């Protein structure tokens, strides 16, 4: 049986292509996809043509984007990183036929995996398999944000994800999937207060349905509102930490304004257009603020041996055990047949359709 793969041929050009299945080899296993989650940030950047990998070469040795042959030219044949699948055949002791696993191999109906090269997270039987789309990659992105906040407070002496948020006042800018999962992590790990800020009423409604407090940035100055509410001492008001989860420069500027003096923004956003509007001569300078990038490619320095990706996935499973019902009911705003992926992705990229979190069902 041929496999179907979502392919981006160029900006705004998405199709489903049929491919002959790969031959199963010793040490590998074959999966059949059940669900594939859509990232409305990273993968839409390939549909829009705004991802920097499309126009430049990333020099991993120097950590620089450099002119030349792009690292990921069109056609992009591996789009997406939130898959749940059933093991159909196995020639490895790592998994057995019938196992349900979370992986990150892109929007396709089947895949041959090598457990020595591919991340494979077995899903527990008590977890709704549709929620497994968050386990391999998306959830760890959010958990890694909390880990960066913990490292900001305690360096390498971090003992748990709550170390940077427990008992503290926390703001989350952006109520997309990353922002809402991050806010749930923050709430679960004992924040004194957590407030989610987003200009979109529908997204604020989702946050409230998840049990989170919200604030509309357009309804007056949100920095004044939160700094009036959150007092630490004379001349010391605002959020202890802000998780910035929206890929717009104006959102980063807002996040900096919400902080108390010497507070920290943990930045999980992807600024496809750069961040030219960020103003570093005002609150950033005068309040002595800090900005930490919590990119999923690395955990905080000195913590990799203890906090690997597997542990972050395990933390995600525990989060979903607590909040799974409301996540499935409210955070997942659409479940779409796999064959409709091209129409869905182009509509999302062109802003003709708005969703918080979408799952493709095979």
Image (cartoon, grey):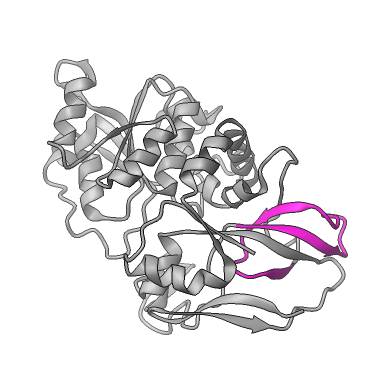
Which segment is the magenta one?
A: 83-112
Is 242 situated left or right of 53 in this image? Answer: left
**Visible residue check, residue 268:** yes
- Side (left or right) of 299 relative to 223: right
Q: Where is residue 31 in the image (x, y as percent from the top left)?
A: 75, 64
Magenta span contains residue 124 = no
Residue 325 in the image: x percent, y percent? 57, 36
- Could you tell me which residue is drawn at 42 percent across and 41 percent down? 180
**Which image quadrant for residue 205?**
top left
Q: Residue at x 56, y 52 (%)?
A: 137
Q: Which of the 4 quarters of the picture holds residue 228? A: top left
Task: Residue 92: say if magenta.
Answer: yes
In the image, residue 347 lies at what x, y percent?
A: 38, 69
State which quarter of the image contains the C terminus: bottom right
Residue positioned 46% across, 52% down in the render: 357
Residue 311 at what x, y percent from top left?
63, 40
* For residue 193, above or below residue 147: above
At a point 48% along the width and 74% down the height, the residue shown is: 342
Q: In this view, does 56 lie above or below 304?
A: below
Q: Residue furthest top?
A: 233
Q: Is residue 31 above or below residue 259?
A: below
User: From the viewer's perspective, is residue 292 above or below residue 83?
Assistant: above
């Amino acid at each position: 049986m041929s496999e179907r793969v979502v392919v981006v041929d160029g900006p705004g050009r998405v199709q489903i292509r049929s491919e002959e299945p790969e031959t199963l080899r010793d040490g590998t296993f074959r999966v059949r996809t059940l669900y594939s989650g859509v990232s409305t940030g990273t993968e839409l950047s390939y549909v829009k043509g705004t991802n920097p990998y499309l126009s430049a070469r990333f020099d991993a040795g120097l950590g620089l984007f450099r002119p030349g042959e792009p690292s990921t030219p069109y056609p992009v044949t591996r789009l997406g990183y939130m898959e749940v699948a059933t093991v159909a055949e196995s020639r490895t002791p790592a998994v057995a036929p019938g196992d349900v696993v979370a992986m990150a191999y892109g929007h396709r109906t089947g895949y041959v995996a090598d457990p020595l090269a591919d991340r494979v997270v077995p899903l527990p039987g008590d977890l709704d398999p549709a929620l497994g789309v968050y386990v391999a990659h998306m959830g760890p992105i959010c958990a890694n944000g909390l880990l960066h906040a913990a490292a900001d407070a305690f360096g390498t002496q971090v003992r748990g994800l709550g170390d940077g948020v427990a008992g503290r006042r926390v703001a989350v800018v952006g109520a997309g999937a990353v922002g809402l999962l991050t806010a749930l992590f923050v709430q679960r790990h004992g924040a004194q207060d957590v407030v989610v800020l987003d200009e979109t009423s529908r997204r604020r409604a989702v946050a409230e349905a998840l049990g989170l407090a919200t604030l509309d940035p357009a309804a007056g100055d949100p920095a004044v509102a939160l700094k009036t509410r959150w007092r630490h001492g004379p001349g010391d008001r605002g959020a202890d930490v802000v998780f910035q989860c929206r890929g717009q420069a104006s959102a980063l500027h807002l996040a900096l304004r919400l902080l108390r003096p010497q507070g920290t923004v943990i930045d999980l956003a992807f600024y496809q257009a750069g961040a030219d509007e960020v103003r570093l001569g005002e609150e950033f300078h005068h309040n002595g603020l800090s900005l930490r990038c919590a990119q999923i490619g690395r955990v905080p320095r000195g913590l990799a041996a203890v906090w690997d990706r597997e542990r972050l996935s395990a933390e995600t499973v525990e989060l979903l055990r607590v909040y799974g019902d409301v996540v499935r009911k409210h955070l997942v705003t659409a479940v779409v047949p796999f064959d409709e992926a091209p129409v869905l992705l182009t509509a999302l990229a062109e802003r003709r359709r708005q969703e918080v979190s979408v799952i493709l069902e095979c």
